[in-house]
Image (cartoon, helix red, strand yellow):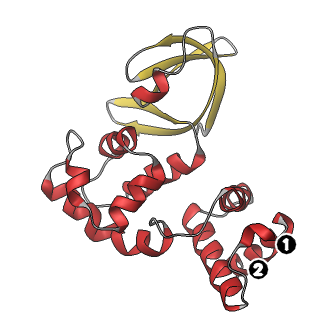
C-alpha cells in the first residue's frame, strides 16, 4: 500500500495532481484547496490512501494523517465509499467535520454535492456517539494529541486503538487533576498511552 508520497508536481488540475517520484508520475486525487495551493515544479508531500477496484486504481492524497484517518473512518459508515468520504473532506476541515457529526448537524453535511439526506443521516447515526467523545468540538487536544496518535500508528497500532488509548489517558489525567496534558513531557504522555493501548 502506498501510504505517503513526496515529489515534484508535474501537473496541477482542479481535483488531482500528477507527482513525479523518481521518474514515475503518480496521479493523486486531492481536494481543490490542495491543487490550488501548488503549481507545476513545486514540491509536495501527501499522506495517501490507495483504493483498488475491479475497474479502477485510485490514489487519494491528504496534507495530514489526521485527514487520511478521517477518510478511513467515514468509510466505515454503511453506504459511504471513498468518493463520498473525499467529497466531505474537500468541503470541511477534519476537526470541523467531526464537530458537525458530533453535534448531529446533518444539514451541514447535506450541503456537500452527492450527500443527500439519507446519507447524511446515516453518517450521523453511525458516527455521532464516537465523535461526541472522540472527535467533537469539545474534545481536548492539539499538537500533543496528533503527535501521540502518529507515534502509536508508527508502532503498529490502528488509528481507532490509538484514539481510544489517548482518550483513556485524558480521562485518567483529568481524574488526577491534570486538565492540560500539554503541560507534560511528550515522552511521559507516550509512556502512559502505550500502557493503556496494551491493556
Reply above or below: 166 against 27.
Answer: below
Q: Residue 171: image x %, image y %?
A: 62, 84
Q: Nearer the viewer, mark 1 or mark 2?
A: 1
The answer to which quarter of the image holds residue 29 is top left
In this rendering, position of residue 12 left or right of residue 162: left
Question: Which label number is shown at residue 195?
Answer: 2
Residue 103 in the figure: left or right of residue 144: left
Q: Which mark is residue 188?
A: 1
Q: Residue furthest bottom?
A: 175
- Establish if 77 lies above or below 35: below
The first of marks 1 and 2 along the sequence is 1
Gap between marks 1 and 2, in whole Å? 11 Å
**Relative to residue 128, is residue 151 depicted above or below?**
above
**Residue at 40% of width from left, 26% of height from top?**
32
Along the viewing direction, whichever of 113 and 194 lies nearer the viewer: 113
Residue 19 placement (x, y as % from top left): 57, 18
Quadrant (top left, top right, bottom left, bottom right) of the C terminus: bottom right
**Mark 2: which secondary structure?**
helix
- Count of all numbered marks drawn on residues in the image: 2
Residue positioned 60% across, 76% down in the render: 167
Q: Residues within 10 Å of mark 2 (few under 14, many from 20)?
A: few
Identify the mark at residue 46; answer none if there is no mark: none
Q: Are marks 1 and 2 in contact (CB under 8 Å)?
A: no
Q: Is residue 199 left or right of residue 158?
A: right
- Quarter of the rendering containing residue 198: bottom right
Q: From the viewer's side, name the closer residue of 168 and 47.
A: 168
| Residue 45: image location, x then y, percent | 64, 29
Element marked by disc 1 = helix
Amino acid at each position: 500500500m502506498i501510504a505517503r508520497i513526496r515529489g515534484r508536481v508535474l501537473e496541477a488540475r482542479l481535483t488531482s495532481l500528477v507527482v513525479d517520484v523518481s521518474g514515475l508520475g503518480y496521479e493523486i486525487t486531492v481536494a481543490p484547496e490542495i491543487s490550488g495551493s501548488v503549481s507545476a515544479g513545486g514540491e509536495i508531500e501527501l499522506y495517501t490512501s490507495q483504493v483498488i477496484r475491479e475497474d479502477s486504481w485510485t490514489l487519494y492524497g491528504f496534507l495530514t494523517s489526521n485527514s487520511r484517518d478521517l477518510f478511513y473512518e467515514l468509510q466505515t459508515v454503511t453506504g459511504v465509499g471513498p468518493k463520498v468520504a473525499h467529497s466531505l473532506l474537500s468541503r470541511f476541515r477534519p476537526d470541523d467535520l467531526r464537530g458537525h457529526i458530533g453535534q448531529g448537524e446533518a444539514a451541514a453535511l447535506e450541503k456537500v454535492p452527492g450527500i443527500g439526506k439519507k446519507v447524511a443521516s446515516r453518517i450521523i447515526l453511525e458516527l455521532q456517539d464516537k465523535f461526541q467523545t472522540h472527535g467533537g468540538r469539545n474534545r481536548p487536544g492539539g499538537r500533543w494529541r496528533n503527535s501521540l496518535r502518529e507515534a502509536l500508528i508508527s508502532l503498529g497500532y490502528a488509528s481507532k486503538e490509538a484514539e481510544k488509548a489517548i482518550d483513556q489517558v485524558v480521562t485518567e489525567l483529568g481524574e488526577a487533576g491534570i486538565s492540560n496534558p500539554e503541560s507534560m513531557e511528550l515522552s511521559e504522555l507516550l509512556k502512559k498511552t502505550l500502557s493503556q493501548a496494551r491493556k
